[in-house]
Image (cartoon, helix red, strand yellow):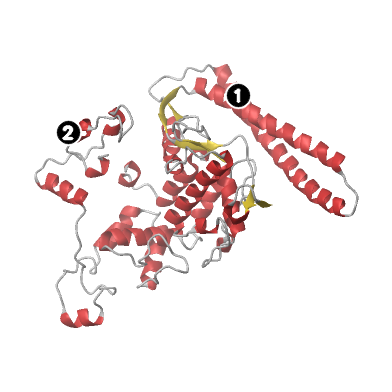
C-alpha cells in the first residue's frame, strides 16, 4: 500500500517483488524496503506434510512460477510443468528453465515445519535496525568490502568451472558411446567445480556474519534470498520428480525473447535478470496486463475479459487499439499507476451514466463497447470506507502491523480472535 500510495513506478515495484534482495540500495532503509518486497515470493501455500523433500521444493517453485508469470504477464506457464503447454507456445523446457531460477532461491517464510519436517526451518529475513547506530568499526567495514571483492572473483571462477564441467560431461558422454571413457579427467574438473562452489558458500557465510555486525539486525519479515546451492533443473517427465530428463539451463519463456534483456547471471539465482526481462519496455505483455487490471477495477470488466490469461484461450480484447495506446502511455509516463488512473477516470467513457438505451441494448446487451457505465455492486470494504469517509471518521493513516500479530495460538483452533472485533476506523484494506 505504501508503494502504491507513493506512486512507485510499476516496473520498479515488480523488480523489488521478484529480486529486491539482489538490487542495489542507497541506504539501509531502502534495503529494508527491497527485502520486505520479496515477501511476494514467500507467500503462498506450502505442503508442509509432504514426505518427499524434492517434491516439496518443486511444489514451492511451481507456485512461485505460477503467481509471478500469471500476475505480471497473464501467462499460465505452470501448465507446462508436466508437458508442453496444450494451447500456448510454451514448451516444458521453458518451465524448467524458470524452475531453476526459483530452485536457486531460498524461501524464508518463518513457517514451522510440518509433521515430516520436509523443508522449512522457520527462519525469516532480518531487516537492518535503522534506529540503532552502526556498531561496526572501520576495520570491520574494510574487511566486509574485501570479502565482497573476493566473492566477485570467486563467483566468476565458479561460473568458469561450472561451464567447463558441463562441456566435459557432454564430451565424456560422447566418448563413452565410442568406447573411450574419460572418467579421470571428468573427476578432476568436477572436484575443481566443487572446490569453487565451497569457496563461494564460505565467503557468503562470512559476509552474512559480518554484515550483522556492521548493520544490526532489526525486525524479521517473510522474504527470499539466493540459495548457497545454485542449480539448473532437470525436466521432471510428466511432472514426476523421480523420473528425470535432460538438464535445462536457467532462462526465460523462449517465445518472449525480447530485446535488451540480460543473460542469466549464473553466479546468482537469475531472479534479477528475470525481473528485468519481465519489466523490459519491449516485453509486449507486462504493461498491457497491468493496464487491463486497472481498467477491470474501474469498469468492472477488463478490455481483455480474462485478466489473468492473455494466452490463446483468453477472451479477445474488445478494444485492442485502446489497450495498446494505454500500455504505451503507461510505460512512457514512467510506469505511473496514478497517472494511468487519472487519464482513464477523466475520460468521457468513464463519466458516462448508467442510463438505459433500447437501441444500444439491442446491439450490445453486455455493454462490451461501453455505451454506458455498467451498474455493479460495491465491495463490502468500499461501502464501509465510504460510510466512514462521509461521517468524517475515516483514518487514512496506515496502522503499524496487523491485529492478527497479537493473536496467540493457531487461528481456527486455539487462538482467541475476539481481539479482531474491536472498533477501528482505518481503511478496510488494512483489516485482517
Q: Name the residue tied to disc 2.
A: 422
Q: Residues within 10 Å of mark 2 (few under 14, many from 20)?
A: few
Residue 305 image label? none
Q: Which residue lies at the image location 54% right of the left edge and 38% below the top edge?
A: 51
Q: Which residue lies at the image location 59% right of the left edge and 61% below the top edge?
A: 91
How far is disc 1 from disc 2 in space, using C-alphas?
Answer: 47 Å
Residue 206 image label? 1
Residue 297, image x and y in percent?
A: 29, 58
Question: Taking 255 as reference, is 266 above or below it?
Answer: above
Residue 388, image x and y in percent?
A: 13, 44
Residue 121, image x and y in percent?
A: 50, 29
Q: Residue furthest left?
A: 391
Q: Between label 1 and label 2, give the one nearer the viewer.
A: 2
**Which image quarter holds the N terminus?**
top left
315 left or right of 142 in image: left
Q: Which residue lies at the image location 82% right of the left edge and 38% below the top edge?
A: 187
- Viewer-nearest residue: 47 or 304: 47
Residue 304, image x and y in percent?
A: 37, 67
Amino acid at each position: 500500500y505504501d508503494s502504491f500510495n507513493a506512486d512507485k513506478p510499476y516496473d520498479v515495484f515488480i523488480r523489488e517483488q521478484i529480486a529486491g534482495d539482489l538490487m542495489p540500495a542507497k541506504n539501509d532503509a531502502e534495503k529494508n524496503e527491497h527485502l520486505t518486497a520479496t515477501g511476494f515470493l514467500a507467500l503462498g501455500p506450502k505442503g508442509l506434510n509432504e514426505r518427499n523433500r524434492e517434491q516439496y521444493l518443486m511444489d514451492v517453485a511451481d507456485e512461485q512460477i505460477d503467481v509471478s508469470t500469471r500476475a505480471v504477464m497473464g501467462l499460465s506457464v505452470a501448465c507446462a510443468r508436466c508437458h508442453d503447454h496444450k494451447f500456448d507456445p510454451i514448451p516444458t523446457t521453458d518451465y524448467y528453465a524458470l524452475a531453476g531460477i526459483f530452485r536457486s532461491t531460498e524461501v524464508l517464510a518463518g513457517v514451522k515445519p510440518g509433521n515430516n519436517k520436509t523443508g522449512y526451518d522457520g527462519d525469516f529475513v532480518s531487516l537492518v535496525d535503522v534506529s540503532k547506530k552502526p556498531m561496526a568499526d572501520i576495520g570491520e567495514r574494510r574487511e566486509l568490502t574485501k570479502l565482497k571483492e573476493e566473492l566477485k572473483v570467486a563467483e566468476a571462477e565458479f561460473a568458469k568451472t561450472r561451464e567447463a564441467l558441463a562441456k566435459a560431461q557432454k564430451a565424456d558422454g560422447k566418448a563413452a558411446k565410442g568406447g573411450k571413457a574419460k572418467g579421470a579427467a571428468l573427476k578432476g574438473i568436477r572436484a575443481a567445480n566443487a572446490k569453487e562452489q565451497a569457496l563461494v558458500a564460505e565467503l557468503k557465510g562470512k559476509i552474512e556474519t559480518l554484515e550483522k555486525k556492521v548493520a544490526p539486525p532489526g525486525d524479521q519479515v517473510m522474504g527470499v534470498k539466493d540459495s548457497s546451492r545454485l542449480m539448473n533443473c532437470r525436466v521432471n517427465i510428466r511432472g514426476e520428480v523421480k523420473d528425470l530428463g535432460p538438464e535445462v539451463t536457467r532462462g526465460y519463456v523462449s517465445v518472449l525473447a525480447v530485446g535488451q534483456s540480460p543473460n542469466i547471471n549464473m553466479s546468482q539465482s537469475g531472479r534479477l535478470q528475470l525481473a528485468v526481462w519481465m519489466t523490459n519496455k519491449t516485453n509486449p505483455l507486462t504493461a498491457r496486463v497491468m493496464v487491463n487490471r486497472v481498467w477491470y477495477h474501474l469498469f468492472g470488466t477488463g478490455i481483455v475479459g480474462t485478466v489473468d490469461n492473455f494466452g490463446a484461450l483468453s477472451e479477445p480484447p474488445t478494444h485492442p487499439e485502446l489497450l495498446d495506446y494505454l500500455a504505451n502511455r503507461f510505460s512512457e509516463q514512467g510506469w505511473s499507476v496514478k497517472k494511468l488512473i487519472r487519464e482513464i477516470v477523466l475520460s468521457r467513457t468513464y463519466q458516462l451514466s448508467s442510463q438505459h438505451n433500447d437501441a444500444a441494448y439491442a446491439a450490445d446487451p453486455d455493454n462490451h463497447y461501453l455505451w454506458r457505465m455498467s451498474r455493479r455492486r460495491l465491495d463490502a470494504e468500499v461501502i464501509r470506507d465510504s460510510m466512514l469517509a462521509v461521517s468524517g471518521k475515516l483514518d487514512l493513516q496506515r496502522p503499524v502491523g496487523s491485529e492478527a500479530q497479537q493473536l496467540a495460538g493457531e487461528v481456527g483452533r486455539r487462538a482467541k480472535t475476539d481481539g479482531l472485533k474491536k472498533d477501528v476506523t482505518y481503511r478496510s484494506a488494512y483489516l485482517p
